[in-house]
Image (spheres, grey):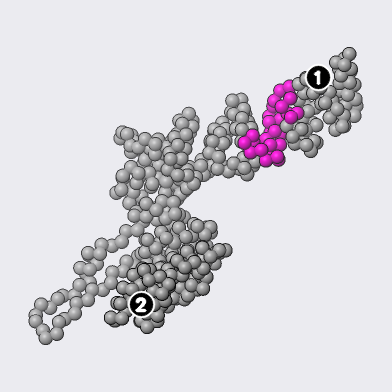
Amino acid sequence: MAEQRYIEAQQLLEQTLLLQKSQELLGLLIEVYQVQGVALPYDLALEFIKANKDSHQSLEIISQLNHQGIESKVLEIKLYASIGALNKLNEKISDFYLYLFERKIPQVFDEVITIRKKYFQSDFNLELKELALSFDRGWNKELEDEIQKIIKDCFHKFNLKNKADRLLKLEKIFASYQSNNAAKIYHHLFVLYNHGIENSLDYKKLIELIIYFEDVEMKGIVLNLMDLLSLEKEAHQYADAIKKDTHYNFVHFSKYYPHLKKYFITPRSLANEVKEDLEPIDLTLDEKEKEVTITDWVDDSVVDSDAEIAEGLKYMEYDPSGWLNLAVGFIQSDFNKSALMCAKKVKEASVDEVDFLKASYLAVHALMKLQDYRIALDYCYEALEKCTLETDYLSFSYLEVELLIQLGEKASAKKVLENIHLIDSSYRLSSKMLKRLNEI
């Protein structure tokens, strides 16, 4: 009897809904279906869900539908996003992409892509599934831009192990998509990275990569490949061509490919420079020994490059960690003006003592290499005022001593060394420096 009553109630509600649409009546009808254990009608359930504010109830209703379709799957994804269930959300997006791929549905679902980029911006597996779906829509510039972004991320965001794994997966996807010449070029890129040069035809593939890519960052990835394949002579020639590109940026290569700097910085031979600058030596005996001076070697091209890079850095944006890493790299490469600019960026943007002191330390060293000792000393005094740890105070005090000595203020340097010695008698050979200053 109870079952018969539910059936009668169901029929009455269905007839009423034909005459008058009501969220309340829809809710009652769904409850009747649920009590009977009957699968919910697709269209009526979706109509109720769209106006329902209870996400958990809506998800339960979707799980009880008599069949699943594109609209219900998209709604399910949006509901999981609204409640922040990220594991389920990732699973449902992945299932949805597979559903579209199996049915060869070329439609673009912007809402789903927006959610994926918001919550799983660096999820490589989801990116690959989107890529596979894009292939079915045909090759275009938007697709190629997305491919290049995925490739660049492999080199810019992941460690060596993850990069190798991702390149293998990309090779597998592109191996099944060979109907387009451009796609073949990208497949060659992955094959060469994953397997190296195996026969003479592989050199032809490398030449095709060099000819094809116009984007300077993709050229950097090809240059990195040439270095990996130990083609140093060819890499030097290719680097010369890259430097002529209007979008060439040394900072980009210094940050992501520091091992490639050897192709962009080629200092002149010191031996040849000295040979040119040596004055003839008079070997005749005189009462006074004749002095022979050798002019300091300065690579003017490097100095000019340093100034140009430092100027360009004014318009760049990085977080403090990025600027500090760049500063260290520039100091190691003797690009001291560039290192100073990076350090200044951190000092200006620093919100804590640690970043400020790190930046000050690098700035002082850059200024010392530039022989601008007076400004370096000002930076040192500024840092000493902010030091709260003894180790930091001693480090900058020691730099202060070195700068005072360079400025010829030996008495002041001696006083600072005596203070260092009082704080820590074993600190950085302070006793030995005091003895040397006393001898002077």
Q: Give the main secondary structure of the magenta stretch.
A: helix
Q: Where is residue 395 in the image (x, y as percent from the top left)?
A: 42, 68
Question: Badge 1: few (under 14), some or many (20 or more) residues near its Cα, within 10 Å?
Answer: few
Q: In this view, does 349 lie to the left or right of 428?
A: right
Q: Of the residues shown, which amino acid type is indicated by label 2?
A: Gln
**Picture quadrant of residue 52:** top right
Q: Toward the viewer: 423 or 336?
A: 423
- Specify whether residue 75 is painted magenta: yes
Residue at x 59%, y 25% (from the top left corner): 102
Q: Position of residue 268 (x, y in %)?
A: 28, 62
Let me know if residue 13 appears in the view: yes
Residue at x 39%, y 39% (from the top left corner): 193
Q: Toward the viewer: 238 or 17?
A: 17
State the SS at label 1.
helix
- Specify whether residue 181 is painted magenta: no
Q: Which residue lies furthest to the left in this view?
A: 285
Q: In this view, does 257 lie to the left or right of 53?
A: left
Question: Badge 2: few (under 14), some or many (20 or more) residues near its Cα, within 10 Å?
Answer: some
The residue pinned by badge 2 equals: 406
- When the figure is inspected, residue 74 is found, relative to residue 340, above or below; the finding is above
The residue pinned by badge 1 equals: 36
Badges 1 and 2: C-beta atoms under 8 Å apart? no
Residue at x 41%, y 59% (from the top left corner): 329
State the SS at label 2.
helix
Q: What stretch is highlighted in magenta?
A: 60-89
Residue at x 74%, y 34% (from the top left corner): 56
Q: Position of residue 113 (x, y in %)?
A: 63, 39
Q: Of the residues shown, which amino acid type is indicated by label 1?
A: Gln
Q: In which quarter of the image is the C terminus?
A: bottom left
